[in-house]
Image (tube, rainbow, N blue to C red):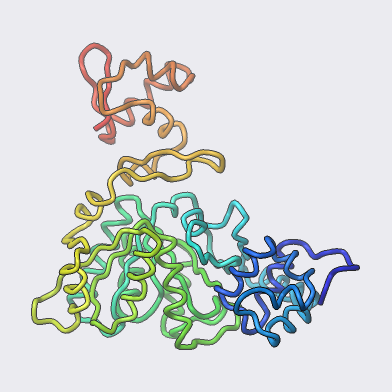
């Protein structure tokens, strides 16, 4: 449906209309948005304008022209009824790390909630058919990561994915599951209870419509979202034909760090990991190896600013604690200078410094000085 003579739909409605067009995948959607700017602009184009977009054929262009406003509005109402939020790539709620990848999904379905803490995330992927060794270590690494302040991202699949999600949940941390199917129908079905726990302590995300059923080609496609959400990706156990290696390729293309956990030298389940390590990917044994490789990280402090996180534990600090800590460097800093830099009441600064010292973020030095540990 063209909107040349009608009132254009709201941006979210327009994005929903496009997302319902059969045959319009991520790459074609990205090409349309690159050409016309917004979903609303796409819907206002003529057939001739649409056909000038590389890769867009007559059938899909006709479906775009026939996109239904009423169907999109009904879809949005259904999302609201079942507790699904739609996130546009232009919105502040959309995951910031994901915006940087070239084929970021323009619309995400979210069950649960995303937080600013999720800007510091690590993906854990591996084989569905995995060994007890792989399950044990995926859970161990996930638990260590959330205790260090990270959110764990994986794909809710059988095997390593499920072990990673459970490891994060059991440690009381946050985890995000990226689905290839719709978020209304959980796949695999035996992970329905796990998905409910993830909603309580994180989020389910999908670019697919609510009712999307599993299709083979959609799983490699969703892997770019797992890596796109993450500062780095850990491969715990993967054969040479494992789908986890698709995530590795996406991570490398997106400039993310890649880590591999070695397995027994004669294990077919870890051949993919061993190949990665041989080719230069960082070998890890524990979360300390991950932190050492990542170094200082940049994460949003608020919508209009960023801050450097020297250690993921800093993500648990409240805004005042973060502000005071960021006024202290690895060189001895006078307390008076911290007070001037933060412009806070001196008594509040002193009490917060005591808290930071007790939690081993800083150390007091003679001469009323403090230093970041």
In the rendered image, the quadrant that contains the N terminus is bottom right
Most distant residue in the left direction: 265
Q: Is residue 170 above or below residue 126?
A: above
Among the 4 quarters of the image, the one containing residue 72: bottom right
Of 56 and 30, nearer the camera is 56
Residue 234 occupies which quadrant of the picture? bottom left
> Measuring 19% from the left and 54% from the top, which residue is drawn there?
289
From the viewer's side, name the closer residue of 157 and 173: 157
Number of numbered labels in the structure image: 0
Relative to 272, does residue 298 appear above or below in the rendering?
above
Q: What residue is drawn where x is 44% and y is 80%?
A: 219
Q: Would you say 340 lies left or right of 280 here? A: right
**Is 293 left, or right, of 96 in this rendering?**
left
Residue 24 pos. (x, y %): 62, 79
Residue 195, horizontal then vertical, whole percent: 46, 73
As drawn, 276 above or below 127:
above
Q: At which x and y percent is residue 217?
A: 46, 85
Quadrant of res 224:
bottom left
Q: Position of residue 132 (x, y in %)?
A: 19, 79
Q: Is residue 165 above or below residue 310?
A: below
Quarter of the C terminus within the rendering: top left
**Is 306 displayed left or right of 124 in the figure?**
right
Q: Nearer the viewer, residue 223 or 357?
A: 223
């Amino acid at each position: 449906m063209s909107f040349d003579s009608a009132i254009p739909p709201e941006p979210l409605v327009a994005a929903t209309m496009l997302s319902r067009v059969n045959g319009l995948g991520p790459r074609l959607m990205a090409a349309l948005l690159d050409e016309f700017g917004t979903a609303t602009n796409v819907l206002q184009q003529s057939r001739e304008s649409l056909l000038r977009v590389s890769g867009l054929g007559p059938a899909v262009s006709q479906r775009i022209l026939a996109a239904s406003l009423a169907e999109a509005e009904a879809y949005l109402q259904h999302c609201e009824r079942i507790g699904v939020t739609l996130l546009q790539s232009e919105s502040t709620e959309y995951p910031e790390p994901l915006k940087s990848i070239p084929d970021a999904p323009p619309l995400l379905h979210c069950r649960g909630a995303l937080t600013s803490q999720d800007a510091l995330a690590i993906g854990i992927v591996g084989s569905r058919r995995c060994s007890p060794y792989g399950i044990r270590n995926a859970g161990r690494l996930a638990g260590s990561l959330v205790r260090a302040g990270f959110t764990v991202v994986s794909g809710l699949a059988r095997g390593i994915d499920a072990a990673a999600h459970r490891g994060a949940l059991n440690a009381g941390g946050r985890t995000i599951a990226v689905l290839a199917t719709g978020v209304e129908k959980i796949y695999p079905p035996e992970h329905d209870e796990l998905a409910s726990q993830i909603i309580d302590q994180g989020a389910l995300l999908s670019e697919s419509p609510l009712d999307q059923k599993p299709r083979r080609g959609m799983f490699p496609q969703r892997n770019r979202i797992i890596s796109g959400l993450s500062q780095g990706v850990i491969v715990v156990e993967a054969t040479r034909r494992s789908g986890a290696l698709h995530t590795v390729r996406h991570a490398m293309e997106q400039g993310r760090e890649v880590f591999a956990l070695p397995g027994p030298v004669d294990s077919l389940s870890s051949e993919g990991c061993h190949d990665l390590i041989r080719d230069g990917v960082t070998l890890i044994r524990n979360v300390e190896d991950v932190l050492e490789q990542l170094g200082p990280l940049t994460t949003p402090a608020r919508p209009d600013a960023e801050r450097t996180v020297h250690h993921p534990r800093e993500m648990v600090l409240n805004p005042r604690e973060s502000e005071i800590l960021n006024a202290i460097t690895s060189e001895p800093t006078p307390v008076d200078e911290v007070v001037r830099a933060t412009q806070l009441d001196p008594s509040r600064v002193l009490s917060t410094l005591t808290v930071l010292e007790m939690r081993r973020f800083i150390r007091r030095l003679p001469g009323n000085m403090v230093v970041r540990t």
